[in-house]
Image: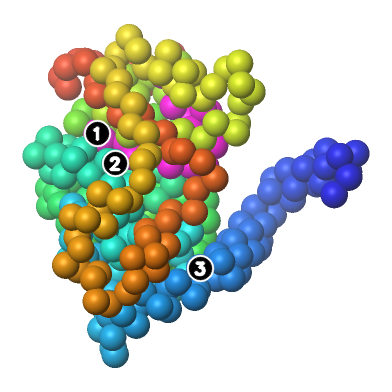
Amino acid sequence: MSLLLRPWRDFHRRILRKVAPGPVDWFRAYRQRWRFCRAFRFDQRVFKEAFYPGNLRPEILTGPFRGMRYLDEVVWGPITPKWAGAYEMELHDLVAGFAAAGYDRIINIGCAEGYYAVGLALLDSNATLYALDFDPCARLQVRRLARVNGVSERIHVQGRCTVRRLNRLITAGTLIVCDVEGEEAALIDPVKVPRLNQADILVEVHESTLDATATVQNLITNRLLASHEIECRVWSGRESWMEEHRSIWEGKVSPGRMMKSLDEARSGPQVCLWAKSKLHADSPIHDPDER
């Protein structure tokens, strides 16, 4: 598409989203699923035949969500890394510790089909989960996944996250897991969302939203530096998973095929920020609506 036409295309998309957000979101959701199906359906079929023969329902094979029953359909991105349990393995130690942290509320922004929302509900039977996503297919899928795993009563599925909605959802003892494909720069802002200062935050960073002189990673880090202890996690290869879990895949698929199944289809090295609040849970929480 010509560079001259792109501003007009983007303008019309913004107008359509304001006038008819429902149909636009459904159209985008179906278009994404068609693209994901074309890209990943072969790998998905091969993996299922090897690890879940016959009518076996897929379950996550390893990792902190091991044993979680899962969907067998097109989801947001490749499903096979999640089936294997290698998905975002750089965060596994953090995820495994969330249950022991005793969160009262977990907010999953950009929940997709519910990998984290349902997985964390299974890990922590005392937490209430909020799963938010603009994608209507994702909202249907997270509800199905919650039913399959028997946690529907503790997962509240909602639509697009806004700064006002986020600030209202945060209470003392809240964990936020955020993966919103570029909107994190607008949402993870304590000036707009003051209650973020008391929440623990795990946020996936997407650098395409800002130019090279003002990266999203630096922007969010600087915003949270006064109130949080911040740690950066960077994605690595999957060779260590392959070696550790050799007994699971060896004899079922080739090493090359298994490695392909672990590919999360990212455009480059992924970065996540883990921000642990330094404020006391019993400190007063200020609501900007009260001003």
Please state if 278 lies on the left or on the right of 30 as rendered.
Answer: left
Q: Name which quarter of the figure residue 45 lies in.
A: bottom left
Write the residue at 34% across / 82% down: 49
Rendered location of residue 76, percent (x, y): 48, 59
Foreground: disc 2 or disc 1: 2
Residue highlighted by disc 3: 40
Q: Which mark is residue 41?
A: none
Please tell me which of labels 3 and 2 falls first in the chain: 3
Front residue of 268/76: it is: 268
Depth order, front residue of 239/146: 239
Horizontal relation, residue 70 to residue 35: left or right: left
Q: Say if 103 sits above or below 31 in the image.
A: above
- Residue on which disc 1 sits: 174
Answer with left or right where residue 76 lies relative to residue 59.
right
For image coordinates 12% across by 35% down, the residue present is 101
Q: Which residue is mark 2?
A: 90
Mark 3 or mark 1: whose residue is earlier in sequence: 3
Q: Mark 3, mark 1: which one is toward the viewer?
A: 3
| Label 2 or label 1, whichever comes before in sequence order | 2
Residue 15 can be seen, yes or no: no
Q: Which residues are magenta?
A: 174-190
Kind of residue sitting beneath label 2: Glu
